[in-house]
Image: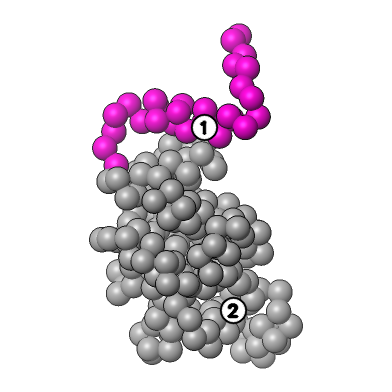
Amino acid sequence: MNIEHILPEDIEKRSFEIIEQELNGRYIPPMEKPIVKRVIHTTADFDYLDNLFFSENAVEKAIEILKKGAVIVTDTNMAKSGINKNALKKLKCRVECFMADADVAEAAKAKGITRASASVDKAALIQEPIIYAVGNAPTALIRLEELIKQNLIQPELIIGVPVGFVNVVQSKEVIMNGSIPYIVAKGRKGGSNIAAAICNGLLYGLRDR
């Protein structure tokens, strides 16, 4: 067994070199490639080459809105904590998660809906441009589409990567058939770490330009 001796500060760089090698020259659109590679880096799962879907010019549109200062809303505090705060600060952007808010819990109980759905209702009150990143709750995607149709919320981008079994596949299809730009992981795979990785891929892409 050959163990590579890599300096700590070079581990991420070496990881991306390995990912590039294992792509075997596969073509990925240049704007999408850094995000796909970051998701693979986060998961060590090359299935994302085939199940990560981008609407037309989704990355370009997201970058433009981040340049102007946007609010990223997540459906878990785990995703929120995984998004690079320094990169957000430089762009005068911020990230919010309302899942633990007392008013969201009260609204969810009163209406008989999930906290994720109630969080979308609260996000609809935000005045700034929104990128909504869902890594856990398909009900958040379903509620988003309902409010979009009612013209009560208009995210600039939806990152739809919830993980699981109940309504996960269906909720992603709803977003892909909707009117809002998206980045979606088709199928059952996803997670809060994937949502954060995609957000960071967008932010780091701006940083590196």
Query: x and y percent of residue 162 in the render?
Result: 51, 60
Q: In this view, does 70 lie to the left or right of 193?
A: left
172, 18: nearer the viewer: 18
Point 55% across, 58% down: residue: 87
Tell me if residue 69 comes above or below residue 146 in the rendering: above
Q: In the displayed structure, does residue 1 sit left or right of residue 204?
A: right
**Relative to residue 148, is residue 135 depicted above or below?**
above
Which of the two residues, 157 or 148, is positioned nearer the viewer here? 157
> How far across and down, in percent of the image, does residue 138 sit?
51, 67
In the rendered image, the residue lying farthest to the right is 102
Q: Is residue 137 visible?
A: no
Q: Which of marks 2 and 1 is in front?
A: 1
Q: What residue type is labelled 1?
A: Lys
| Residue 89 horizontal side relative to residue 102, left or right | left
Label for residue 124? none
Disc assigned to residue 119? 2
Residue indicated by mark 1: 13
Residue found 47% across the figure and 40% down from its top: 40
Q: Eyeballing the image, is 134 above or below 28?
A: below
Which residue shows up at 43% across the image and 48% down it? 208
- All told, the count of numbered labels is 2
Q: Which amino acid does label 2 sit on?
A: Ser
Please identify the quarter of the rendering in which residue 25 is found. top left
Estimate how packed mark 1 is, as few (under 14), some (14 to 19) or many (20 or more) residues with alpha carbons within 10 Å. Answer: few
Viewer-proximal residue, 109 or 208?
208
Mark 2 or mark 1: whose residue is earlier in sequence:
1
Residue drawn where x is 63% and y is 17% of the image: 5
Q: Does the magenta stretch include residue 195?
A: no
Q: Position of residue 77 (x, y in %)?
A: 66, 64
Q: Give the range drawn in magenta.
A: 1-28
The answer to which quarter of the image holds residue 106 is bottom right
Query: Residue 9 at what x, y percent from top left?
Result: 62, 32
